[in-house]
Image (cartoon, rainbow, N blue to C red):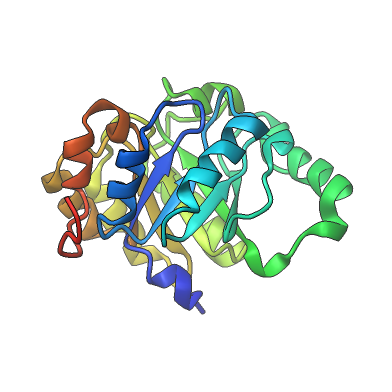
Amino acid sequence: MKNKWLSSLKHLYKLDPDCSITEEQIERLSLSGTDAIVVGGTLGITYEDTNQLLRKLRKHRITVIQEISNMEAIVPGFDYYFIPLVLNAQDPQWILNAHQKALKKYGDLIHWNQILVEGYIVLNQESSVAKLTKSRTNLDLEDVIAYARLADKMLNLPILYIEYSGSYGNAEWIKELKKTIDSVQIFYGGGIHSSEQASEMSQYADTIIVGNLIYENFEQALETVVHKAYLFR
């Protein structure tokens, strides 16, 4: 059974603590109609930068989530924490080893009602996350469907994250994935640069994530909130 709050998420912005963003831009993102803001990234993530960004976000009435990629950068005070599990990683550090180390250190302190695990399938071989995790990205649709079933049926994960990280993915693949899963929520992230692409991916993915575009073309990023009327521009 899907998490009701999770099922309500249709659009997320992802902010990288290692990138610059103004107070005004944070306000506009918070009031854009997006459902939540995720804070996370692959490289250069520090506790100090993450904490500073959280302080700015907390000035606004928006749900904030930390996606954890660096154990040393975990910051208390977020509403939820997303934990990536890279299903097609070939480096075991990013499948279970890093998670076991984190639980050994912080397990007694975790509020499990705030934790949601994401089964990642990384599909852009040029992305930082693919290189870091040594992900096997030369997959066909049958491979991706098998990973999706692994997340949905065997691991019972709440989230299946299809990560193209900078390049726009194959909407038909997302459509086919939707037919094969029952409970897992499909997140799509990567290369959304227009309201048209946001609308296309929203037809098949349960949740779309917009990240790089915020720093490349902020006004265009605002246009990707296609499921709600804008509250502030």
Point out the residue furthest to the left here.
196
Percent across and percent down for residue 148 are: 47, 55
Q: Residue at x 41, y 34 (%)?
A: 123
- Residue 174, given in percent of the width and then of the height, sits at 30, 52
Depicted 143 relative to depicted 157: above or below:
above
Would residue 222 be seen by someone viewing this image from the given angle? yes
Residue 6 is left or right of residue 105, and the answer is: left
Asked if residue 146 shows in the view, the reply is no
Counting from the top left corner in percent of width and height, residue 116 is at 60, 60
Give me the residue at 14% from left, 47% from top.
Answer: 195
Residue drawn 51% across and 79% down?
Answer: 1
Residue drawn 26% across the image and 26% down it: 216
- Vertical position of residue 58 compared to residue 52: above or below: below
Task: Find residue 155 and report its horizontal and vertical position in percent.
Answer: 63, 61
Which quarter of the figure has residue 169?
A: top left
Number of dots carrying numbers: 0
Quarter of the view holding residue 229: bottom left
Foreground of the two, 134 or 180: 134
